[in-house]
Image (spheres, rainbow, N blue to C red):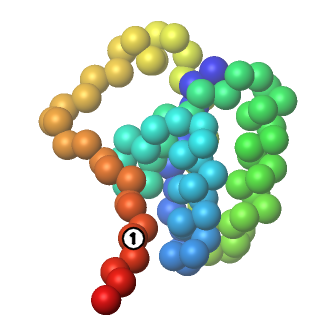
């Protein structure tokens, strides 16, 4: 099942941790939105638990929208902007 997962995380460190976790499940399609493919209800439940443990329930919010085949096939994308993952690097002098 594919899920659209959107988040609003107040803290930079928590936000980076959430993005890193979600990137293991699917591509980032907007700055705070991922399309995640989860193989089973158990995997979805496990991801929800991990996300719940990572957020501050007062300051943060994550929304998971399950998408059926009709929603996936009917997806319309306007514009060609591609979100590139941030690459950490070192400058050595």
Quarter holding residue 88: bottom left
Q: Viewed as shown, does residue 3 lie left or right of 48? A: left
Q: Is 55 displayed left or right of 67 in the figure?
A: right
Q: Position of residue 57 (x, y in %)?
A: 71, 68
Q: Residue furthest front?
A: 93
Q: Judging from the image, what secondary structure is the residue with disc 1 in? A: loop
Residue named by callout 1: 89
Locate residue 43, reporting x and y percent: 78, 32
The residue closer to the viewer here, 43 or 64, is: 43
Residue at x 55% of width, y 16% of height: 68
Residue 51 relative to residue 75: left or right: right
Q: In this view, does 18 lie above or below 43?
A: below
Residue lying at 45% horizontally and 18% vertically, measured from the top left = 71
Q: Give the residue drawn at x 79%, y 26%.
A: 41
Q: Position of residue 89 (x, y in %)?
A: 39, 70
Residue 45 position by quadrant: top right
Say above or below: 17 vs 83. Answer: below
Point 43% across, 44% down: residue:
28
Marks counted in the figure total 1
Looking at the image, which is closer to me, 58 or 19? 19
Q: In this rendering, would 29 be left or right of 7?
A: left
């Amino acid at each position: 099942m594919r899920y659209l997962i959107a988040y609003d995380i107040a803290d930079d460190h928590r936000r980076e941790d959430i993005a890193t976790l979600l990137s293991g499940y699917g591509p980032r399609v907007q700055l705070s939105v991922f399309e995640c493919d989860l193989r089973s209800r158990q995997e979805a439940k496990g991801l929800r638990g991990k996300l719940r443990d990572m957020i501050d329930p007062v300051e943060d919010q994550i929304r998971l929208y399950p998408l059926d085949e009709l929603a996936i096939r009917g997806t319309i994308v306007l514009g060609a902007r591609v979100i590139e993952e941030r690459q950490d690097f070192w400058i050595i002098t």
